[in-house]
Amino acid sequence: MFAKIRSVFAQVNPAVQPDGATHAPGSAQWWRDRYLQRLRARGRGLSIERICQVALRIIDEGGARDLTMRRLAEELGTGPASLYRYVTSREELLVEVADLVLGELEPPDPALKWRDAVERLANDLRRVLVGHRGVVLISSNAPLLGPNAMRAREMFWSVMDRDGCEPQFAVQVYSSVMHFVVCSAVFSASASRRGDSAWSGTASSGLHELLDLLPARKYPTVLKFSDYGDRPDPEHDFSFGLRALLDGLWRSKHDE
């Protein structure tokens, strides 16, 4: 009897296998099953897109902790059981929401060379992630393999392919830039959540008080540079690092 129930549930949500096993949310196998489920679910009144849009609004307004399946169902005017036809858990829902956010990326100007196009995409990706601080930490916990993540890869790699870049180099550029952008966005979101003004571009009296306790003989350079360290500019620092990264990748490509 239980085997039959599992089999029926697996048809409703392919992420659950007939033997009861599940794939880790965000994994390649999990996303494969999600793609198949979306094809089967077309035409229904409720959609994973609509569910994720409402979930994102809840997260943006109050943070990820405010998102519960019960509250989401209430916002959608349905019952929690209806949501489980689309996601089997809150963890799966968060992975889907993280992919939804990536759909806000804008394609770069086709006239741009790959180096400038990638810079444009990287800045836009950071804008999107920082704009949804409750989601950015979720995005760093699983591979980006959903439909919108794949669209982002296509935008990155197509401009490089157009300019004659080798596939291996294009993949290395994408990996390097994505790591830099996501880490920058995660750090910014974490600092914002802590209310850490020392890393949000404003002066911090708390940091001044900490620095006043440091012995100058032991930390002479820290104290020498503290005026800048107390007033960082996250946007400028990101742009500086991104340009340095891309300039190095550009030179490595054209010095071959």
Image (tube, grey):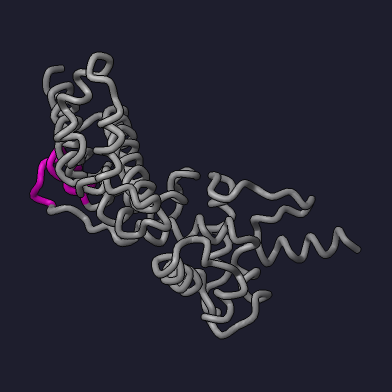
Task: Report the residue that reaches farthest toward the top.
Answer: 217
Percent across and percent down for residue 83 are 61, 72
Give the magenta part as a residue range: 110-123
Q: Determine if the magenta segment contains residue 119.
A: yes
Quadrant of residue 254 in the image? top left
**Rendered position, 51 above or below 24:** below
Percent across and percent down for residue 9 are 74, 64
Task: Report the residue that reaches farthest toward the right.
Answer: 1
**Rendered position, 130 above or below 252:** below
Question: Which quarter shows the C terminus?
Answer: top left
Depth order, front residue of 26/39: 26
In percent of the image, x 74 and y 48: which residue is there?
Answer: 21
Depth order, front residue of 168/248: 248
**In this rendering, does residue 17 appear at all?**
yes
Dominant secondary structure (helix, strand or loop) of the stretch shown in magenta? helix
Horizontal side of 121 relative to 58 (left or right) equals left
Quadrant of residue 248 in the image? top left
Depth order, front residue of 134/203: 203
Depth order, front residue of 76/2: 76
Horizontal side of 48 relative to 160 (left or right) equals right
Q: Determine if the magenta segment contains residue 122.
A: yes
Question: Which quarter shows the N terminus?
Answer: bottom right
In percent of the image, x 19 and y 31: which residue is there?
Answer: 226
In percent of the image, x 17 and y 42: which residue is there?
Answer: 231
Horizontal side of 35 relative to 156 (left or right) equals right
